[in-house]
Structures are given as C-alpha cells and as structure tokens.
Amino acid sequence: MNREAQKLRQISKSGWRDILLGVKAAHKRDNLSVISAGVAFYALLAIFPAIASAVSIFGLVADPTQLPQQLSNLSGFLPQEAHQLLEQQLSRIVESSAGALSFGVFGGLIFALGSSAKGMKAMITALDVTYETEEKRGFFKLNALAILLTLGSIGFTLVALGLILALPAMLVNLGLPELVQTILNIGRWFLLALMIIFALGILYCYGPNRDSPRWRWVNTGAVVATVLWIGASFLFSYFASNFANYNKIYGSVGALIILLMWFFLTAYAVLIGAELNAEIERQTRHDTTSK
C-alpha cells in the first residue's frame, strides 16, 4: 500500500514506523550532528554582516533606534547572553549616522552576500547529503542559487523583524483597543511560524541537487523542523539562562559560544526535517517531483 501512496494520508501506520526508523538510521549514517556543526560555523560567520545589512535597509523605512529596545521581545526565545550580544551589535549599528546607514545598504549588503552565501552553500551541501544526491551543478549555477536563497533569507529576516520588533510599536501608535492589540500580538507569532514553514519548504524544494518535489512532500518536514526549532530554542534559552554558565567557562567568548550552539540546534532541526522528507518520499514508487 505504501509503495502506491500518492498522498501522505495513504501511508499506513507501519509505513510511518518505517519512516521514523529510516530517519534514525539516516541520522547516524549521515553524521547529522557533525554536518549541523559545520553549517552552524558558517552561519556564525555570516550573521553579523547580515544583521548590519538588514538593519541598514530597515533604517531607510523606519526609525532604527527602536530596534535595540524592541529586541526585548526575543528575550525569552534567545539565551540571555546571545540576546545581549545581538543587542550590543544592533546598538552599535544604529548609532551610525544616516549617511553611514545608507552606505551600509550597499557596502554591507555586498559583504553580507559574500559571507552569507557561503553559509547557504554549506546548508545546500548538507541537504545534498540528507537526500543522498551528488552536487553536479556548476560553479555559477550553484553560487547564483546560494545568493538567491540568501537574498530570500535576508528578505525573510526583514519581514520577521517587522513582525517581532516593529509591530508592537506600531500597534501602540495606532491607539487600538488593548484586546485587539493582544490578539494581534499573539497572532504575529503564529504568522511567523507559518512563514518559517513556507521558507523551509522553499529551501527543501530548491536547495538539494534534485528535481523539485511537490509541496505536499516537503511540508511535513517543514512543520516538524519548525516545531523542533521553536521547542529547542526555548529549552536551550531556559537551560543557558538558569543552569549553564558559559561566560564562566569560556570567558569573553561565552556569548559567541551560545550563539553558535543556537545555530547548531537550528541547523539540526532543519536537517531532521529534510531527512524526514527524504524518508517519506522513499515510501512510494510514484514520482514525487513537480516536473
């Protein structure tokens, strides 16, 4: 029955058990923790120039001085040390003059694309491993894809910044009733989760070197990855804030270590979702691509 499945609901319980066992085996075979660590390293190299570019663009349409204060919305989501590190970087950037911010849109964005594209290429390589496909795309095609996905991630970050940081201030200025503000404030997190699912679906479709699958064959992994990432982020934030003392162990680089660990958890969740999608597709003999 599972080999004839054309939709997820046609997969039997035994099929789902085989999928989970397959994910477990693939996790060990593909050395997922090691690959996630590599992706996290490149993400750490890319994050600060990417933030500089995103804030520079944000500063052209809104008051960037609001960003450090509004970053408090993430205080329960990010570990305290990582939150403070990002807040310090944001404060340093927004203290620049308007001219510097305008220049940063071009200079910083070019630098960020070079760094972030390397991080995206690391993720693409990791996805190739999870889907057991060999990377045969040429230099220009692969780099163009990495840059496009990077631009998409920067655009996503800007929209996320608007939802997380700018929306609360906008609601206060609009003078809406408190109940309406509460509903909209809660709703923005659900909207952000849907955006993350959509973004991961795009990454799963176009990242690995393969024919793009239909959406129904990637949305399960995207949902699972989003749930794992959100849950792991909150748990790690709680653990780092209440039990682990990274600053005592690592000194001045403690905040960077925490941020690197958070990137590791992020990459791990994304790749688990990819492994799940790959195993789901292996359950059917039907073509799962959109060609």
Image (spheres, helix red, strand yellow):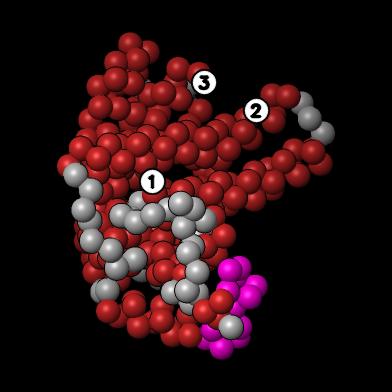
Task: Give the residue pinned by disc 3.
Answer: 62
Q: For marks 1 and 3, give the one nearer the viewer.
A: 3
Q: Mark 2 and mark 1 in contact (Cβ < 8 Å)?
A: no
Give the amino acid at mark 3: Ala
Tag 3 or tag 1, which sits nearer the N-term? 3
Please tell me how many numbered marks the rendered image carries.
3
Give the amino acid at mark 1: Gln
The answer to which image quadrant residue 278 occupies is: bottom left
Q: Main secondary structure of the magenta part?
A: helix
Q: Residues within 10 Å of mark 1 (few under 14, many from 20)?
A: some
Give above or below for 115 relative to 290. Answer: above
Task: Give the residue pinned by disc 2.
Answer: 170
Residue 215 in picture, x, y percent from top left = 54, 55
The answer to which image quadrant residue 53 occupies is: top left
Q: For marks 1 and 2, give the one nearer the viewer.
A: 2
Residue 164 visible in the snapshot: yes
Give the left or right position of residue 37, taking residue 262 as reference: left
